Amino acid sequence: MQLFNRYIKLVMLAGLLFTTSSLYAKPDVVALNQQPPRQNLLALRQEVAEFLTTQTVGYPGNVGVNVGLIDPNLRLTKCHDLEVFLPKGSRVWGRTSVGARCHTPSAWTIYTQATVSVSSAYLVASKPLAQGRTITRDDLMFETGDITQLPSGIYTDVSQALGRVVNISMQAGTVLRQEMLKQAPVVQQGQTVMVVSSGRGFSVSAEGKAITKANEGQVVQVKVANGQVVSGIARQGGQVEIVF
């Protein structure tokens, strides 16, 4: 009988422990069920990649976009209203930083690194070029590479460089940049030019001598036959345009 009573007590104690542990477990299960869904980080990277790809429309050559890994330890609430943006000072070129901002249901912002490469043809000197030389087609050749890794102001079109004057001497293979070539004057000092005056319903032309040299579109002074000095806009072919 004594042994039976002890057995009954052990059964009751075990039941009490089971009930107590169940009571403590229930709040954890409820809390787990109430946690909001997490943001899919792979989907977030894809959103950033699509944003950068859209921003590169119109770039020359072949564009490549590579978005860096997002810290897998981040626990972000799944976003219903996501905005991808460029932080101040960033640009869609080379190595850059991109932001992603959530507005609802929870506000959060993260930043990730990305690389935008642009494989395109660019101009280099085909031979050594001396200072003062006027660029011709034979002076130029194309090379292809990632232009985001090159200095700014490179030439990607032959027409951009033709007729310009070499500003500093350079070796063959030198990547041509805008500061290396200057625009050739279309009017030289002392050159005989044709001054064309035009207005509503009339156009008059006369010869004169340029007092100064000027590039295309610059103002140049010209002395005409009667000794008068006039100012006009220098144009190709030794013309000076005066518009009334």
Image (cartoon, rainbow, N blue to C red):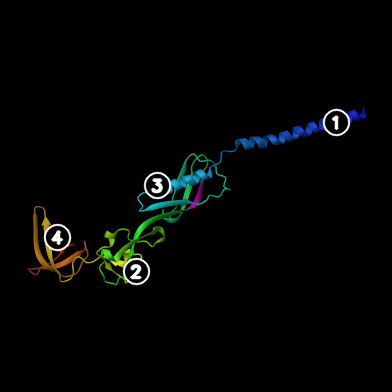
Q: Residue at x 49, y 47 (%)?
A: 45
x and y percent of residue 151 in the render? 38, 62
x and y percent of residue 32 in the render? 63, 37
* Disc 2: CA contacts within 10 A as few (<14), some (14-19) or many (>=20): some
Residue lying at the far top in this picture: please name it. 1
* Disc 1: CA contacts within 10 A as few (<14), some (14-19) or many (>=20): few
Q: CA distance from mark 1 to mark 4?
A: 116 Å
Look at label 1 and name its amino acid: Lys
The reply to whether the magenta stretch includes residue 167 is: no
**Mark 2 sits on what residue?**
172
Residue 148 left/right relative to 31: left
- Badges 3 and 1: C-beta atoms under 8 Å apart? no
Q: Give the residues in magenta.
A: 109-113
| Disc ID at residue 63 | none
* Disc 4: CA contacts within 10 A as few (<14), some (14-19) or many (>=20): some
Look at label 4 and name its amino acid: Ile
Q: Looking at this view, is 216 or 25 the one in front?
A: 216
Q: What kind of secondary structure does the magenta stretch mostly adopt?
A: strand
Q: CA distance from mark 3 to mark 1?
A: 74 Å
Q: CA distance from mark 2 to mark 4?
A: 42 Å
**Mark 4 sits on what residue?**
242
Q: Residue at x 44, y 48 (%)?
A: 85
Nearer the camera: disc 2 or disc 3? 2
Look at label 2 and name its amino acid: Ala
Q: Earlier in the sequence, mark 1 or mark 4?
A: 1
Q: Image quadrant of residue 237?
A: bottom left
Question: In terms of secondary structure, where does tag 1 sit?
Answer: helix
Residue 133 left/right relative to 145: left
Q: Earlier in the sequence, mark 2 or mark 4?
A: 2
| Disc ID at residue 9 | 1
Q: CA distance from mark 2 to mark 3?
A: 37 Å
Residue 206 left/right relative to 44: left
